[in-house]
Image (cartoon, rainbow, N blue to C red):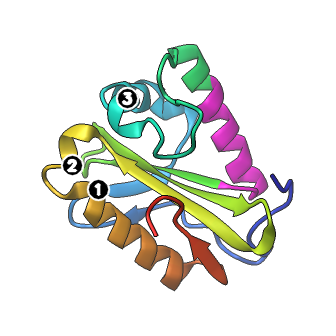
């Protein structure tokens, strides 16, 4: 993975994106309990969605804390961006969105998203995908956006 910023220095990275159903905020260690509960409630749905590692099967809360700390640091370095998807009252984690550099191109990013398994039947993951795609296309400076496993 590239260890460089993926957005220009003058780009103001969004701290929030709100819709009528949820709000996206930078994922941090402060979301640990809500994030871990959301991940572990959706293990079968998430396996293979991001990569072929088997994540999140067997994930411990300590490992999740390490992951969230990594996401938070990457965000401050502008190397990648992870957003938690929260209910409007911010009491529940609904899912996450991730923006990663492409390993093979400095002009391309890979975008991933997921919602809790229980929200699939309500169409939240489809809605999140549409919202996330439009947000990246309209408000971010990326030339090429890839949605691995979704496109």
Q: Which class describes the residues within 10 Å of circle 1: few (<14), some (14-19), or many (20+)?
A: some
Asked if residue 85 can be seen in this view, the reply is no
Left or right relative to 122: residue 117: right
Vertical order, 90 against 134 (above or below): above
Residue tagged by mark 3?
A: 43
Residue 29: x percent and y percent?
Answer: 56, 31
Q: Are marks 3 and 1 in contact (CB under 8 Å)?
A: no
Asked if residue 75 can be seen in this view, the reply is yes
Chain part drawn in magenta: 66-80
Of labels 2 and 3, earlier in sequence is 3
Residue 77: x percent and y percent?
Answer: 78, 53
Vertical order, 58 against 118 (above or below): above
Q: Of 99 and 150, which appears nearest the observer?
A: 150
Where disc 3 sits, the SS reads: helix
Residue tagged by mark 1?
A: 125
Vertical order, 126 against 72 (above or below): below
Where disc 1 sits, the SS reads: helix
Report if residue 78 lies within the magenta region. yes
Q: Which mark is residue 120?
A: 2
| Magenta span dominant secondary structure | helix
């Amino acid at each position: 993975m590239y260890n460089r910023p993926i957005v220009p220095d003058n780009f103001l990275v969004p701290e929030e994106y709100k819709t009528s159903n949820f709000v996206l905020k930078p994922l941090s260690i402060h979301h640990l309990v809500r994030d871990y509960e959301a991940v572990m409630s959706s293990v079968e749905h998430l396996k293979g969605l991001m990569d072929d590692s088997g994540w999140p099967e067997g994930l411990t809360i300590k490992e999740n804390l390490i992951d969230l700390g990594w996401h938070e640091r990457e965000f401050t370095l502008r190397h990648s961006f992870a957003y938690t998807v929260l209910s409007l009252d911010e009491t529940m984690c609904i899912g996450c969105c991730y923006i990663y550099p492409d390993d093979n191109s400095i002009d391309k990013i890979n975008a991933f998203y997921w919602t809790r398994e229980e929200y699939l039947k309500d169409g939240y993951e489809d809605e999140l995908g549409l919202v996330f795609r439009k947000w990246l296309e309209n408000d971010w400076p990326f030339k090429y956006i890839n949605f691995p496993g979704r496109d």
